[in-house]
């Protein structure tokens, strides 16, 4: 079942952990964009464009900071492309199950060049896309990111939904530790204690 | 009753008050008692004033009310009055139910008195306020002082029941304390918190206990149940469970006009409180505007999260352990003596107080088998 396949099964050099970091960053940026675009003056256009732009900005920052040696922003134009463990991937804001932006599956110049380096014999090259989508819940939309892999005939051969864990779920970095309360233990009363004391006194007297 | 003569013991006086206590604890009306004894309601009433029951009637009363005969021959020590109890659900619970619960608590205190002769419970270790509290800011300080005195820092409390027991409060399950009565507390000889046993929401259970701790700390000698004192206890519970210094720093910012529910889930699981309590607290600390809090409550109501909420199953339920541990310390013979001195029956302790009692290590064996 494609739904349960992780992209790393198709691309062995792709690390699950690395992909999780990228997806978490992507969603974090998208959620922040959502905050900014929830004013009364926002339109579908601003709500669509800002997350895409902010994700681009996040990737630029990750590249600039250089903390992730396995991550690169290989194409800085509007069809920005990232490389995770050497696997190229573009971001698409669309429904992964009902894709409207068919043209976004086409490989861009960077991807084509990448493929050319691998040679024409390598027909198994997969086109990777990260689809960012919203459930449009009026009480607070939930954003999801799905990694889709397309073969040369643009058939979906891999589909994997990322399980989002907020990067910083809380504002502070140092959380107060949970207070563990010890068990209270009742103690059996020593009813003979008084008698023992009396006996000791008697012995001393003797 | 004397086994040899079949008469009531000489010298011991039948206590009509204790009969009324046992009847109230059993939730029986005078008419019911009359019917079960085969006497009129008026005579049943008279038994609770000055009449003395016949040996047969006494035996029947013991059966009906689940007590032993000597229960009726010890004078009533200190009664539990309704005014002493910090009841919560005043609107939903009936006066009769409250009386029943108060009587059961009084009987429970008899058991604790006897247990206390054999077992030393933790000493009562919290300072009750001498003066009435006024103002929300003051309650924050009271809760902070409580945390400081107990040396429990500012983090989430792993277990509120254990905290209550650690400071010498006995937490009790009463079978009849259901949704109509909610949790309540009183401080007679020893502070007691009676839990509502029907709640399946661990966050609310913890909040209830913290609320009752608030009553015990702030409302000694003050009649509670009014909106003001209940509100104060709620504020104490909020401040105790979610101290402003640490909680405010952790509360996730809004996502524009939406609450950040995934982050609130993390917060709920960390602080072990309900979503509702989180939003109330955030509103009280001005982390949310009134409109934002309202939209949060509307969202919860629309999802049907009133009595139970999403992710409650991820928070462990708490259970009182102290009284059970005290009983577990006793051997069968001592337990039997304790029970007899209190005038109670195993059935009552097991059923009404939901406690397990020691069982005899010896069992009767049939010697007749194999002789056929």
Image: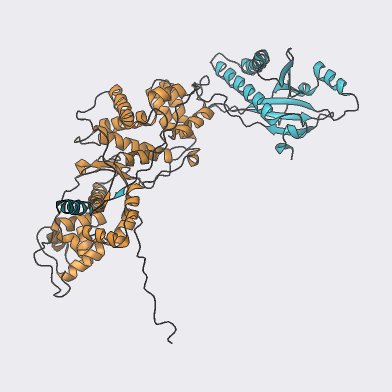
Observer-nearest of A126 and A63: A63
The quadrant where residue B143 appears: top left
Task: Give percent across and percent down for residue B170.
Answer: 30, 45
**Left or right for A61, reference B345:** right
Q: Which residue lies furthest to the bottom in this view?
A: B372
Task: Give percent across and percent down for residue B123.
Answer: 26, 41
The answer to whether any part of residue B27 appears in the image is no
Task: Give percent across and percent down for residue B53.
Answer: 14, 66
Observer-nearest of B205 and A48: B205
**Left or right for B297, reference A8:** left
The answer to whether any part of residue B341 appears in the image is yes
Of the chain colours in the picture, the one used for chain B is orange
Image quarter in which the N terminus of chain A is found: top right
* On screen, residue B292 above or below B16: above
The quadrant where residue B38 appears: bottom left
The quadrant where residue B90 appears: top left
* On screen, residue B12 above or below B184: below
Residue drawn at 61 percent across, 18 percent down: A47
**Left or right for A181, reference A106:** left
Q: Residue furthest right?
A: A121
Of the chain colours in the picture, the one used for chain A is cyan
Image quarter in which the C terminus of chain A is found: bottom left
């Amino acid at each position: 079942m494609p739904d349960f396949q992780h992209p790393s099964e198709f691309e062995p050099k792709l690390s699950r952990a690395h992909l999780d970091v990228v997806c978490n960053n992507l969603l974090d940026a998208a959620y922040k964009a959502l905050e900014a675009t929830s004013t009364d003056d926002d339109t579908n256009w601003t709500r669509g464009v800002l997350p895409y732009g902010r994700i681009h900005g996040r990737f630029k920052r990750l590249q600039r900071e250089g903390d992730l040696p396995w991550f690169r922003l290989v194409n800085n134009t509007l069809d920005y492309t990232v490389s995770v463990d050497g696997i190229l991937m573009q971001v698409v804001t669309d429904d992964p199950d009902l894709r409207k932006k068919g043209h976004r599956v086409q490989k861009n110049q960077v991807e084509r060049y990448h493929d050319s380096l691998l040679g024409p014999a390598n027909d198994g090259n997969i086109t990777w896309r990260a689809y960012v989508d919203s459930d449009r819940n009026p009480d607070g939309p939930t954003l999801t990111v799905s990694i889709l892999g397309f073969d040369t005939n643009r058939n979906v051969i891999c589909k994997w939904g990322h399980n989002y864990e907020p990067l910083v779920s809380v504002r502070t970095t140092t959380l107060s530790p949970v207070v563990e309360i010890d068990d209270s233990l009742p103690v059996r009363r020593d009813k003979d204690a008084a008698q023992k004391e009396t006996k000791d006194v008697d012995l001393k007297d003797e | 009753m004397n086994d040899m003569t079949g008469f009531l013991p000489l010298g011991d006086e039948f206590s009509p008050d204790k009969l009324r206590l046992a009847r109230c604890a059993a939730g029986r009306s005078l008419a019911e008692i009359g019917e079960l004894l085969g006497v009129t309601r008026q005579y049943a009433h008279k038994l609770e004033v000055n009449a003395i029951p016949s040996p047969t009637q006494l035996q029947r009363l013991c059966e009906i009310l689940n007590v032993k005969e000597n229960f009726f021959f010890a004078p009533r020590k200190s009664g539990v009055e309704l005014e002493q109890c910090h009841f919560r659900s005043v609107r939903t619970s009936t006066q009769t139910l409250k009386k029943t619960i108060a009587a059961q608590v009084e009987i429970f205190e008899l058991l604790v008195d006897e247990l206390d002769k054999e077992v030393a419970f933790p000493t009562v270790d919290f300072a009750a306020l001498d003066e009435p509290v006024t103002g929300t800011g003051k309650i924050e300080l009271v809760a902070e002082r409580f945390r400081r005195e107990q040396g429990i820092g500012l983090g989430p409390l792993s277990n509120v029941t254990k905290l209550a027991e650690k400071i010498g409060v006995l937490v009790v399950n009463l079978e009849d304390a259901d949704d109509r009565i909610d949790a309540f507390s009183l401080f007679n000889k020893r502070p007691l918190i009676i839990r509502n046993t029907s709640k399946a929401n661990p966050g609310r259970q913890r909040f209830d206990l913290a609320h009752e701790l608030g009553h015990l700390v702030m409302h000694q000698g003050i009649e509670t149940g009014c909106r003001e004192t209940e509100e104060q206890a709620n504020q104490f519970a909020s401040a105790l469970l979610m101290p402003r210094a640490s909680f405010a720093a952790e509360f996730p910012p809004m996502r524009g006009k939406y609450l950040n529910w995934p982050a609130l889930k993390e917060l709920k699981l960390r602080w072990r409180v309900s979503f509702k309590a989180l939003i109330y607290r955030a509103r009280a600390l001005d982390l949310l505007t009134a409109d934002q809090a309202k939209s949060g409550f509307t969202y919860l109501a629309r999802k049907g999260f009133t009595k139970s909420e999403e992710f409650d199953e991820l928070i462990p339920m708490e259970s009182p352990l102290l009284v059970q541990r005290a009983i577990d310390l006793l051997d069968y013979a001592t337990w039997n003596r304790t029970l007899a001195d209190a005038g109670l029956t195993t059935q009552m302790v097991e059923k009404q107080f939901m406690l397990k009692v020691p069982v005899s290590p010896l069992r009767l064996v049939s010697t007749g088998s194999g002789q056929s």
